[in-house]
Image: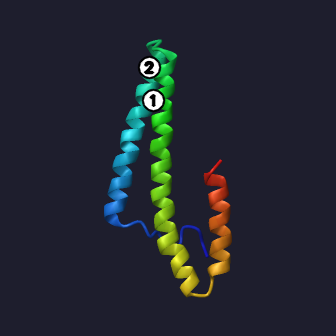
Amino acid sequence: MEKNAHSMVSQRNKQDLLNRMRRLEGQVRGITKMIEDDRYCVDILLQISASRAGLQKVGLSILDSHTRGCVTSAIKENRGDEMVDELIDVLDRFMK
């Protein structure tokens, strides 16, 4: 199965993900400005932590869609082992 064969992200979920990513872009620009402005290190670290948590939430949402959509479909089509292997691989990479 091609990795880009289909997307199971709903339009509503897609818009939510795009909104979250735009907020994260703003957060990262804010961190850059904090560094430029010589802000307190702890404040910068807290913003970095918040950005990482936001990215994790986006990733988990996409992982949820993938599992409920692509993996479930593959299991119904008797291609479950292949998709479970892919899922394990992606989880391994995602958790690093």
* Residue 47: image tag: 1
| Mark nearer the N terminus (2 vs 1) | 2
- The residue depicted at 51 percent of the width and 61 percent of the height is 63
Q: Is residue 84 above or below residue 52?
A: below
Q: Secondary structure at mark 2?
A: helix
As rendered, which of 1 and 84 lies closer to the eye? Answer: 84
Q: Is residue 71 above or below residue 16?
A: below
- The residue depicted at 67 percent of the width and 56 percent of the height is 92
Distance between the Cα atoms at labels 2 and 1?
A: 9 Å
Looking at the rendered image, the quarter that the N terminus falls into is bottom right
* Residue 70: image tag: none
Q: Can you tell which quarter of the image residue 85 is in? A: bottom right
- The residue depicted at 46 percent of the width and 50 percent of the height is 57
Report whether 44 appears left or right of 82.
left
Give coordinates of residue 36: x percent, y percent. Answer: 47, 16
Q: Can you tell which quarter of the image residue 81 is in? A: bottom right
Give coordinates of residue 77: x percent, y percent. Answer: 57, 87
* Residue 34: image tag: 2
Please state the total of marks drawn on the protein image. Answer: 2
As rendered, which of 28 and 92 lies closer to the eye? Answer: 92
Most extreme residue toward the top, as rendered? 38
Q: Is residue 33 above or below residue 69?
A: above
Could you tell me the amino acid type at mark 1?
Gln
Give coordinates of residue 70: x percent, y percent. Answer: 52, 74
Give coordinates of residue 91: x percent, y percent. Answer: 62, 59
Report whether 61 appears left or right of 81.
left
Q: Is residue 39 above or below residue 91?
A: above
Cβ–Cβ below 8 Å for labels 2 and 1?
yes
Mark 1, other Cα within 10 Å: few <14 / some 14–19 / many ≥20: some
Could you tell me the amino acid type at mark 2?
Met
